Image (cartoon, rainbow, N blue to C red):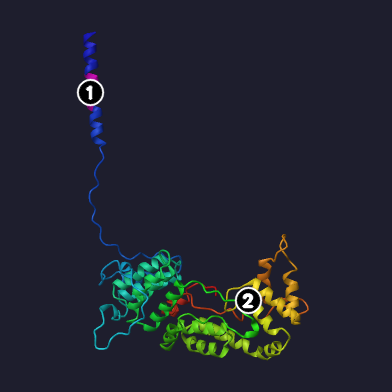
Amino acid sequence: MRPLAGHCALLLAALALGLHAVEARVQPLRPAAIEMDPPLPPRIIPSTVGHSEVERELRTLERLATSEKPVYAAGAASQARGGSAKSLAKPKAGKAQPAASAPAAAGGPGTAAWLLGLIHLHGAGVARDPVRAQQWFEAAWARGEPLAAAGMAWCLIDGCAGPPSPAAAQPWIDRLARANRGRALFLAWLSLTRQSPLALAEIQNPRTGSEDPPLPHPELLLEAARLGDVHALIELGLDAASRRHWQQARSYFVAAAPKSKAAAANLEIIDMAQPRSAKSSEAAAAPGAAALAEARRAHRGEGMPADYAMAIRLYRQAQAEGNPEAQKMLALIFSRPTPTGEVDLAWMRQLAYVDVNSLAPSLSNLAGVRVMRREPTPLYDFLPPKWQQRTLPVAP
């Protein structure tokens, strides 16, 4: 019995030593410190597989954009925090401008990164990716491209990589003013309008001839337009068209058309509407014509948010004044009520451009007259025409 007990003791001792060795092997290891280089701009992953020409051009731009080290401090996005919406000051004569306002070398890394940001922002040959676009804009600014300030400002106004923050765009707008004052003024106007609460048009008596509230901060738009900014010209043209100041709208679109397909399309819409002016003057002489015109405007949302309740009130006013078109429109509106007996808003929306003068109500030929366009973004004209052709169509 004693030898057996000795063997058991030896076995237990060996087992204890084995467990201790296992515990020693499974002790958690402290991770070694890893030193990483600063992150490079994002790599391009084109969504247009098979478009070898586009892919080659994108790869070439990427190699060029990352060929040199940044010339400014990294983390350009942090520079945009703070600031106030002060008026843009003109550069003082005789003073050397900061390095950021010096034009980037033609075809240099900054220009390539700026173009890559525009490509990803608009989805030109790649999937639209505002987050990646902002990263390229930061890289472009770090590599000395002054127009990249426009990209950083727009990304803060619109929210490329996070919630929109229009007020934070002002420092970037100030930087942009050194390189492109007209665009800086337009972005300042856009930033202020995005910060302002939505101004809804009040219900006005159509007989008074009163118009919508004036365009906010017109001095910024007018100065930007004087400097030739395309987007300011388009915005002023849209405002004039919403007030039916057709000649004034036409002059703005004519000035912007050589650099903007949207302005050229708006100009074509106005010119197509001109032959109908005689017919419109005859309609204006009909009973209740003023109330009918305002009812249609509220119904279609021309120059103001669509307001169906106001449209119905004005249709009824025109009907009371003896207008047959208003009477027909009201009959159509109430011909399809909801199950609870209320006005069907979807049906109301479909009736906005119906021509009630024909034997069978049909979609009016004027349905597209008021559908005018802006460019997809305030940076679209910076995108070369070759890349503009690679973007998908954008709804008005």
- Which residue is pictured at 50% across the width and 88% down the height? 252
Mark 1 is on which residue type?
A: Ala
What is the magenta range? 10-17
Instruction: Determine contact: label 2, label 1, CB under 8 Å.
Output: no
Which label lies toward us, 2 or 1? 2
Count of labels in the image: 2
Q: Is residue 320 above or below residue 9?
A: below
Give the structural element (helix, strand or loop) at label 2.
helix
Picture quarter with the N terminus: top left
**From this viewpoint, which residue is outermost toward the top?**
1
Q: Residues within 10 Å of mark 1 (few under 14, many from 20)?
A: few
Q: Is residue 262 above or below residue 27?
A: below
Give the structural element (helix, strand or loop) at label 1.
helix
Dominant secondary structure (helix, strand or loop) of the stretch shown in magenta: helix
Q: Specify whether 288 is left or right of 227.
A: right
Mark linked to residue 14:
1
- Which residue is pictured at 41% across the width and 68% down the height? 165
Q: Can residue 124 be seen in the rendering of this structure?
A: no
- Which residue is pictured at 33% across the width and 69% down the height? 82
The x and y percentages for residue 197 are 49, 71
Q: Residues within 10 Å of mark 2 (few under 14, many from 20)?
A: many
Mark toward the start of the polypeptide (2 vs 1): 1
Q: Specify whether 125 is left or right of 328.
A: left
| Residue highlighted by disc 2 | 298
Q: Specify whether 217 is left or right of 282.
A: left
Asked if the magenta segment contains residue 366, the reply would be no
Q: Observer-nearest residue: 95 or 89?
A: 89
Mark 2 is on which residue type?
A: Ala
